C-alpha cells in the first residue's frame, strides 16, 4: 500500500505542456483521481487536468468549481 501515483495535467500547447502535478498516496489510479477531484482536478477523455485547465476542455466534468474563471490557459 505504499504505491504513490502522481496526477499530471495533460494540457498541452504547441510549445509545451502544463507542469502541474498532484502527488497522491493513492494505490490505484482511480483512487488518485478521486483524490484529485477533491483538489478540483478533472479527468475526462483518458486525460487528467489541473484546476486551471479542467474547465475549457472539461465541460462534462461533474466537479464543482468554486474558483473564478481563468483566462490564462491559452498563452500567446
Ligand atoms: Zn494544467
Image (cartoon, helix red, strand yellow):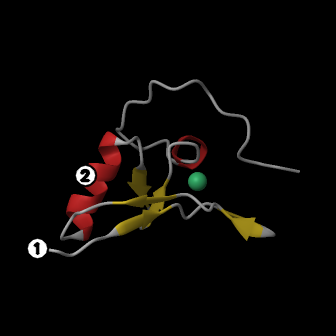
| Count of numbered circles on the image | 2
- Dot 2: within a 10 Å radius of its alpha carbon, few (fewer than 14), some, or many (20 or more) residues? some
The residue identified by callout 1 is 1
Q: Position of residue 56 (x, y in %)?
A: 60, 43
Q: Is residue 60 above or below residue 66?
A: below
Q: Quadrant of ligand 1?
A: bottom right
Give the secondary structure at mark 1: loop
Disc 2 versus disc 1: distance between alpha carbons? Answer: 17 Å
Quarter of the image holding residue 45? Answer: bottom left
Query: Sequence order check: which comes first, mark 2 or mark 1?
Result: 1
The residue at the point 42 percent across, 44 percent down is 60
What label sits on residue 69 in the rendered view? none
Q: Is residue 55 left or right of residue 48?
A: right
Q: Position of residue 27 (x, y in %)?
A: 18, 70
The residue at the point 82 percent across, 49 percent down is 75
The residue identified by callout 2 is 34
The residue at the point 10 percent across, 73 percent down is 1
Amino acid at each position: 500500500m505504499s504505491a504513490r501515483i502522481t496526477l499530471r495535467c495533460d494540457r498541452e500547447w504547441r510549445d509545451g505542456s502544463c507542469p502541474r502535478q498532484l502527488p497522491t498516496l493513492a494505490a490505484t489510479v482511480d483512487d488518485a483521481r478521486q483524490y484529485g477531484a477533491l483538489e478540483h482536478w478533472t479527468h475526462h477523455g483518458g486525460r487528467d487536468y489541473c484546476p486551471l485547465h479542467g474547465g475549457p476542455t472539461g465541460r462534462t466534468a461533474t466537479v464543482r468549481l468554486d474558483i473564478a474563471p481563468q483566462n490564462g490557459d491559452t498563452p500567446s
